[in-house]
Image: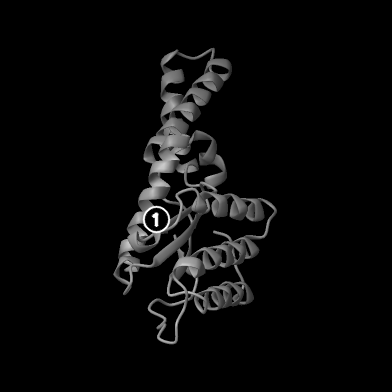
């Protein structure tokens, strides 16, 4: 998990508060360590590790009974599956389609569990970063999507990914929040009766 300082959290929360002054929309920033445990990918890693152990056994246990080569692969399975706990090792074994599915499902789950669908005018919007997969997902409620062109969010996602790749996750969030605020302000401008229905704080989950 990327460690953000209190100052980073404050910058993101302030960006949300400033953006929401111009709109009735509710913007929720969120970071998750990963969107799924990916057991399939972990087993692929385990099998590759077991085969590697078997290859090493073939070379170093050549003078022993060939059954030892098979036995050598068993700890390889356990070790490989355990190595899948480390994102940097597991990531090459992930399939892009599976990543898309799991990141979307995690963002959808967060959208409803955090009650973004329950805002007065159906104007909740979630900006979620999933660190293991290096993906950004933006979900907007029906009130917003009815008026905003479909490609709008992908442009903001691309801008945010560029900031993250440059090593500045905090600025990436702040920029995405500002851009979402700009979009929302056009069709959902703020008013004197504009309650803050959802906390502006950055949500951080495993």
Q: Is residue 127 left or right of residue 6?
A: left
The C terminus, quarter of image: bottom left
Q: Residue at x 47, y 78 (%)?
A: 190
Q: Nearer the viewer, residue 126 or 48?
A: 126
Q: Residue at x 42, y 48 (%)?
A: 103
Element under label 1?
helix
Q: Is residue 71 left or right of residue 162?
A: left
Q: Colour mode?
A: one colour
Q: How many marks?
A: 1
The N terminus, quarter of image: bottom right
From this view, report whether residue 18 is shown above or below residue 76: below
From this view, report whether residue 30 is shown above or below residue 67: below
Q: Which residue is mark 1?
A: 107
From this view, report whether residue 146 is shown above or below residue 8: above
**Residue 41 lies in quadrant:** top left
Q: Position of residue 186 (x, y in %)?
A: 50, 67
Q: Position of residue 154 (x, y in %)?
A: 52, 49
Q: Nearer the viewer, residue 159 or 76?
A: 159
Q: Nearer the viewer, residue 37 or 183?
A: 183
Q: Is residue 164 visible?
A: yes
Q: Position of residue 153 (x, y in %)?
A: 50, 53
Q: Position of residue 76 (x, y in %)?
A: 46, 31
- Circle 1 packing at 10 Å, graded few (<14), some (14-19), many (20+), is many
Q: Is residue 36 visible?
A: no
């Amino acid at each position: 998990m990327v460690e953000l300082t209190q100052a980073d959290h404050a910058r993101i929360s302030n960006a949300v508060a400033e953006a929401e002054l111009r709109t009735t929309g509710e913007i929720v920033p969120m970071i998750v360590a990963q969107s799924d445990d990916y057991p399939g990918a972990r087993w692929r890693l385990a099998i590759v590790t077991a085969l590697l152990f078997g290859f090493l056994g073939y070379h170093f246990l050549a003078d022993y009974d060939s059954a030892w080569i098979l036995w050598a692969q068993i700890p390889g399975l356990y070790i490989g599956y355990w190595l899948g706990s480390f994102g940097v090792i597991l990531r090459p074994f992930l399939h892009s389609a599976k990543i898309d599915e799991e990141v979307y499902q995690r963002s959808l789950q967060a959208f409803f569990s955090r009650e973004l669908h329950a805002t007065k005018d159906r104007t909740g919007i979630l900006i979620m970063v999933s660190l293991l997969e290096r993906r950004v997902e933006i979900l907007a409620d029906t009130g917003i999507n009815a008026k905003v062109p479909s490609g709008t969010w992908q442009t903001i996602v691309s801008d945010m990914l560029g900031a993250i790749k440059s090593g500045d996750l905090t600025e990436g969030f702040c920029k995405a929040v500002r851009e979402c605020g700009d979009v929302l302000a056009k069709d959902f401008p703020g008013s004197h009766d504009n309650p803050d229905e959802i906390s502006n704080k950055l949500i951080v989950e495993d």
